Amino acid sequence: MSRPDLSRKEHLRTIAVAQVEHDEPRKRLRLQGHENLPFVDVLLPCCGEPAEVIMDTVRAACALDYPISQFRVLVLDDGRSSQLQQSVTELQSQYPHLSYHSRGRQSGQVFAKSGNLNYALTTLQQKIEPEFCAILDADSIPSPDFLRAILPHLLQTPNSALASARQHFSNLPEGDPLCQSRNHFYTCQNADFDMLGHAFDAGSGAVFRRKAIVDVGLYPTFSFSEDWQLSHMLHGMGYRTMLVQEELQFGLVPSSLSGHIAQRKRWNIGNSQQISVLFSKDLADIPRSLRLRITLDGFDFVLGELGCFLGFAAIPFLFLAGEVVPATLPPVFNLQFVLALLQLLSTWVYECLQAASTGFRSTPFAHLENKWLSGGKSNHLAVTLCLSES
Amino acid sequence: MTVVHGYDVLELPQDRRILRGLQYSNPLSYAAKAALWSGYLYVSVRFLSIAFAPSWRWQVWVMFVVENVFLCECPCHLHGCAGLR
């Protein structure tokens, strides 16, 4: 009985989407021509990744199907790697619109990626202010039509700030046992949020209006999950954010269980750091209503993980404890039984229909794919919250 | 080909899987409402049966809390969930 109730957030989101008037899913568009296209800076933040991995991304970014005169590729190296700098310098003869930048060795600095991106937005773009910027992770290789596929969505929606491409991965293990493809998140959750105009940026493969990011105060530095928090900030300031479901970028997933857990740990800590937003004097410039929204979202996340862990842990003890259903009149008991079955059945129907609505790109109950990590997540969150208070 | 703010934009054919999934949108919405309201009814009846039971046992209340831990929706999520006002 308890497990189907974990679908409640899914039910609420589905109902919200049904209330919005929309005729068709997001179109597949391609920007045509070579003259007078918007100027774009492609930003590649990196810090310590293997140089050969970064250079694969750099070459793909330089070879985008877009006029060379209308975009730049900026490698933003917080690791201050001489090998990477040399490799980029050698490639500049072939791609003159490529450049290497570093603000000095920043390894170990907190919120380094946000700072790195903000450094590009404020320092490197003083002479040339592009209309749009694209962010690519060090291991995310873009398809040649990456810019031509994403830019039209921003151009045709005046109040849009950001459009992100779904992440695809080139090293997924067969069967994807750890659900690292995040199919459900992209095909159901974020697709629904896109319908509602509030898609979440998942990090790599985002293209944004530079003016909008500057308007909301640049990339937030209060959380490890700067992409997620940026989405909150943009939503709160009235901007529309979008998700493009096409195969436009290919990254790498952690190749080990410990790497997968470490990645999830980082994301969870990033979400838990939202709680401090309302109480932080450094963030007083952010409107109070937006800070409250971000904080409550953080609380919701933390309570959800803790509750899930404690709930699962309590069940075996409860069944050993004896009577867990009160003695009551048979008709009342029967009514509860029928309602429980009805709820269980309707949840199963919902989950199957949801999978079908994605063209079976997702599976029933896929949103529970990482609930087995709730124990570890709760431990990480508790440690993080205790350390932050001390 | 369409013109968007002075730029030529070509529309490509849609992903067939997405098009096939559109027919399930309405049934999905109805299934979501059915699941939601059956859950509300269940919790209400459950609470009343516990509250008016001849005797109270802590195990029963803990079980109810555990069920609602999974069911509980923080009100802030409704505000944060886009589209729900």
Image (cartoon, rainbow, N blue to C red):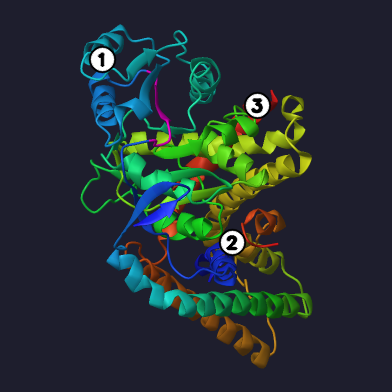
Q: Nearer the viewer, residue A174 or A210?
A: A210
Kindly identify the amino acid type of the residue bearing the numbered disc 2. Answer: Phe
Question: Residue A357 is drawn in which quadrant?
Answer: bottom left
C-alpha span from label 3 to label 1: 44 Å
Image position of A11 with respect to A306: above or below: below
Q: Quadrant of the C terminus of chain A?
A: top right
C-alpha span from label 2 to label 3: 28 Å
* Pointer 2 residue: B70
Q: Nearer the viewer, residue A331 or A290?
A: A290
Residue A48, image x and y in percent? Answer: 35, 18
Local SS, label 1: loop
Kindly identify the amino acid type of the residue bearing the numbered disc 1. Answer: Gln
* Pointer 1 residue: A92
Image position of A67 with respect to B80: above or below: above
Q: Label 1 marks which chain's residue?
A: A
Select label 3 or label 1 by which is in front.
1
Query: Residue drawn 64% across and 33% down?
Result: A215
Residue B30 among magenta residues: no
* Pointer 3 residue: A388
Image position of B3 with respect to A334: above or below: above
